[in-house]
Amino acid sequence: MKLNYFNTQTRAIKVGLATVALALATMGVQAQEKEQHADPNVRAGEKALLDGDFKTAAAQFEKAIPNTGNEPEVVYLLGYSQFQNGDYKKAIDNFSKVISLDPKSESAYYYRAKANNNTAVNTELKLSNNNRAELLRSAIGDYTKAIAINGDDAKLYQNRAIAYRDLGILVGTSTSSNYDKAAATDAYNKAIADYEKVLTYDASRKDIQTEVKKATVYRDNLK
């Protein structure tokens, strides 16, 4: 497949997941000659992204925010860099700001959801089970909003299925303080439905077939 070049003109385009992923996948590929952003910190952040240096990228975009804080593309790139650094709290805050500036930002919903899901399942964090369930439901809500914007992206259904599965595991553990068999059953059923949706895009995916079987077993073995 012929790779497209990364467009560095963040002011002229809506930078989303596909654009950033392409930038990282094509490191070293010469960019098209486009008018660069006027802020040098944004330009430095873009270069750091292309180099896969997310820590430097985040630092540069943070420096740019006082002058570019109302530009959803720049705030998005800051949140994306923070997400890649595992700084999920800051990333969530910035993706929320992107959404306030651009309510149709599918990628901001997607990454805010992933950040909340990653936080919810991090056993090193001292969170109550109720807080973890709240984070997972927030992730599910954001994936649903992203799907409303773009209902043809298999990864949205797959990641929502993961969030439903994680919620099922959390509230379906009989020793859990927030054990709820009915809620767990519902979560597993919705996870299965989303995994099956992914299979409509590519029925040969063995990993998804396995996840359907696992979620079915988890549901059927609830006590």
Image: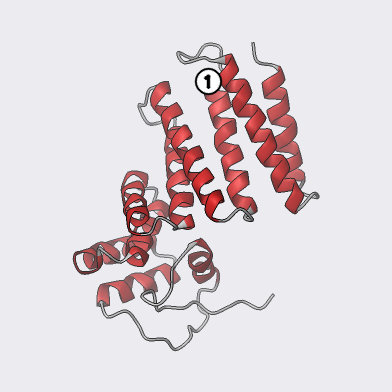
| Residue indicated by mark 1 | 171
Horizontal side of residue 99 vs 6, given as left or right? left
The residue sitting at the bottom extreme is: 33
**Height in image: 216 above or below 118?**
above
Q: Residue at x 44, y 37 (%)?
A: 138
Q: Residue at x 22, y 65 (%)?
A: 63
Tell me residue 166's x, y (percent).
55, 31
Horizontal side of residue 171 vs 47, given as left or right? right
In this figure, what is the number of numbered marks?
1
* Among the 4 quarters of the image, the one containing residue 182: top right
Tell me residue 196's x, y (percent).
73, 41
Mark 1: which amino acid? Val
Q: Secondary structure at mark 1?
A: helix
Tell me residue 15's x, y (percent).
44, 67
Q: Quadrant of the C terminus?
A: top right
* Among the 4 quarters of the image, the one containing residue 58: bottom left
Q: Residue at x 47, y 57 (%)?
A: 107
Q: Is residue 121 visible?
A: no
Q: How is the image coloured?
A: secondary structure
**Height in image: 39 above or below 54?**
below
Q: Quadrant of the N terminus?
A: bottom right
Q: Residue at x 40, y 52 (%)?
A: 83
